[in-house]
């Protein structure tokens, strides 16, 4: 086992993403050439379901891509003031979509890390095709042990990737990498402490993605322990439900759509944006 993958569990996660070829990721990315590995937010333009039937699926795919791109835009909006001389980290970078968007917006260097070699290779090829490989680079590394210089980063984000790691270890690692005053942002699904324990639907999501969804409270406890002070907390649960309702009617369903809709609607699952400053 390599030093990047440090446990049997991480090996199973890497194996999952190395084998993953879901159309919901690939077909949506083909719309604009920006490949995401996360969900969408915002009101759906339901006119995409109108006639003509022969182009309906294409319109649905484009609409879902618009919503997932809007999610990434919202995350980047919360990174604060970033200068071209700064450096950012996309922790759990997938096929690189958010990293390219960050570079396009801020003009700075962006590094991405993933324990999926397949994702890293795909994203680096995208950087080459875009001609930005000197500014956006992806590494086969563990987000808990990136090897980057302490205090060297202006911002870090996790976009739906915190459920694969221990939060205390993750935020300790991020806190060390961030310069004082640096910004951390995550968009994540978490189970609702008020509900009690993970619901059946949340457990189905865990099993589907080989992940371990954390309770909402665990984020704030681990941040407080690691010099990260929340400045924005936004409940995006209602904003993401339309995406899932559209996806459930598309050709790119993966079988997990009903679990997400059930969990969001019964209150056992929440979709949050949390932005925090390093103090």
Image (cartoon, helix red, strand yellow):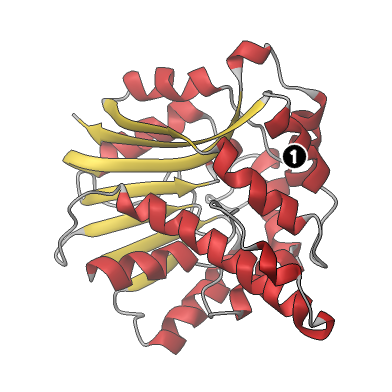
**Residue shown at 59%/59% (left/top)?**
37
Point out residue 163 in the picture as x, y percentages from the top left corner.
Answer: 59, 37
**Residue shown at 58%/36% (left/top)?**
237
**Residue 118 visible in the displayed image:** no
Quadrant of the rendered structure where residue 36 is?
bottom right
Quadrant position of the C terminus in the picture = top left
Quadrant of the rendered structure where residue 47 is?
bottom right
**Residue shown at 72%/21% (left/top)?**
198
Mark 1, residues whose alpha carbon is within 10 Å: few (<14), some, or many (≥20)?
some
Point out residue 148 in the picture as x, y percentages from the top left corner.
Answer: 30, 52
**Residue 104 visible in the displayed image:** yes
Point out residue 231 in the picture as x, y percentages from the top left corner.
Answer: 27, 30
| Residue 227 vertical position relative to residue 278 in the rendered view, above or below | above
Point out residue 258 in the picture as x, y percentages from the top left corner.
Answer: 82, 43
**Residue shown at 65%/44% (left/top)?**
241
Q: Nearer the viewer, residue 44 or 164?
A: 44
For disc 1, the marked residue is: 261
| Residue 3 vertical position relative to residue 264 in the rendered view, above or below | below
| Residue 275 vertical position relative to residue 2 in the rendered view, above or below | above
């Amino acid at each position: 086992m390599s030093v990047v993958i440090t446990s049997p569990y991480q090996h199973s996660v890497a194996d999952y993403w190395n084998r993953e070829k879901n159309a919901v990721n690939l077909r949506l990315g083909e719309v604009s050439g920006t490949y995401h590995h996360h969900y969408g937010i915002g009101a759906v333009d339901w006119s995409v379901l109108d006639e003509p039937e022969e182009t309906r699926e294409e319109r649905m795919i484009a609409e879902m891509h618009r919503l997932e791109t809007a999610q990434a835009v919202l995350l980047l909006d919360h990174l604060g003031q970033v200068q071209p001389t700064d450096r950012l980290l996309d922790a759990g970078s997938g096929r690189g979509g958010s990293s390219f968007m960050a570079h396009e917006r801020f003009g700075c260097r962006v590094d991405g890390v993933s324990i999926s070699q397949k994702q890293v290779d795909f994203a680096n090829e995208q950087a080459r095709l875009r001609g930005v490989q000197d500014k956006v680079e992806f590494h086969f590394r563990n987000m808990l042990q990136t090897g980057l210089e302490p205090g060297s980063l202006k911002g870090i984000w996790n976009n739906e990737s915190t459920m694969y790691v221990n939060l205390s270890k993750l935020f300790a690692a991020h806190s060390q990498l961030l310069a004082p005053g640096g910004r951390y942002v995550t968009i994540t699904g978490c189970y609702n402490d008020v509900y009690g324990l993970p619901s059946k639907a949340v457990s189905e999501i865990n099993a589907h993605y080989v992940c371990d969804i954390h309770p909402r409270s665990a984020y704030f406890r681990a941040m407080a322990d690691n010099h990260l002070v929340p400045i924005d907390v936004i409940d995006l649960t209602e904003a993401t439900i339309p995406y899932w309702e559209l996806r459930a009617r598309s050709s790119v369903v993966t079988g997990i759509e009903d679990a997400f809709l059930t969990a969001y609607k019964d209150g056992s699952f929440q979709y949050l944006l949390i932005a925090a400053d390093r103090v």
